Image (cartoon, helix red, strand yellow):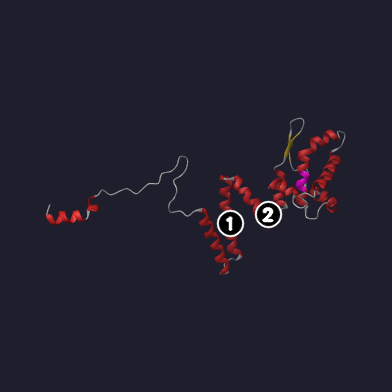
Amino acid sequence: MKSSTKTWMQKNPRILQQPQEPKKIKATKGKKAPCPNCNNSEALNTMYIKMIDEARAKGLTSEKIMNASIADVEDLLKQIKEAHPDLYWRFIKRQHEHLFGCHYNENFGMWRIEQMHYKDKQGVVHHAPHWTKDQHKAAYDSVKSKIPSTYNMYDFAVVLEMLWSDDICLFRTWWPEATDAQLEGKVVEAAVNYLNDDDDPDCKIWHRFEK
């Protein structure tokens, strides 16, 4: 080797070193390796909020654009519902409260009612609803002057179906000779009493199930 070449290599020793592999980040057991180039969730949330705020400021939040954005969120929510149902329902209930307060509308009220069921003494399972929608309305109209005005028909319908599912077997032991129509009257009376509660005068049935 010529002396000039040797001298140059001595002055540049890193040229002689073997190339090193990129440093690997070890994953802990049961977890994925962290992504060093990914922003954290707080930064991503801030990015989303800033994007929406900028669009508002520039007048870009037309109904068409917002509907397209809502459709994207709905697609994402379907994936969240599949993978994390508890998180999904917390979000849905919170959104409902933002839009409608702590009171049921028809869609949410009927969904809640359809989750109810009870087993009679013979072991037969009965699923709600017991009443039709027209019967819900008729019962509500007959007593709405007796309950706080903040409660709507769907709040009352949820209370009716809850009390029927929870207490009808007990009511049948109290009034063994009563007809279904007579027992329904008892449940309506119980629903009025349930909603007249000074401890929670406005949102009692919502808080019973959705908090």
Span of residues in magenta: 157-161
Where is 206 relative to 166, above or below?
A: below
Q: Going from the N terminus, do you reach mark 1 or mark 2 first?
A: 1
Q: Position of residue 56 (x, y in %)?
A: 58, 66
Q: Position of residue 146 (x, y in %)?
A: 85, 51
* Residue in the image at 59% along x and 53% along y: 74
Residue at the spot of label 1: 71
* Residue in the image at 75% along x and 47% along y: 158
Residue projecting furthest to the bottom = 58
Locate residue 159 relative to residue 75 in the image: left or right.
right
Mark 2: few, some, or many residues within 10 Å (few <14, many ≥20)?
Answer: some
Q: Position of residue 39 (x, y in %)?
A: 47, 55
Residue 174 location, quadrant? top right
Give the prevailing secondary structure in the magenta stretch.
helix
Residue at the spot of label 2: 97
Where is 51 relative to 167, above or below?
A: below
Q: Secondary structure at mark 1?
A: helix
Residue projecting furthest to the right = 177
Q: Amino acid at mark 1?
A: Ala
Residue 9 location, quadrant? bottom left
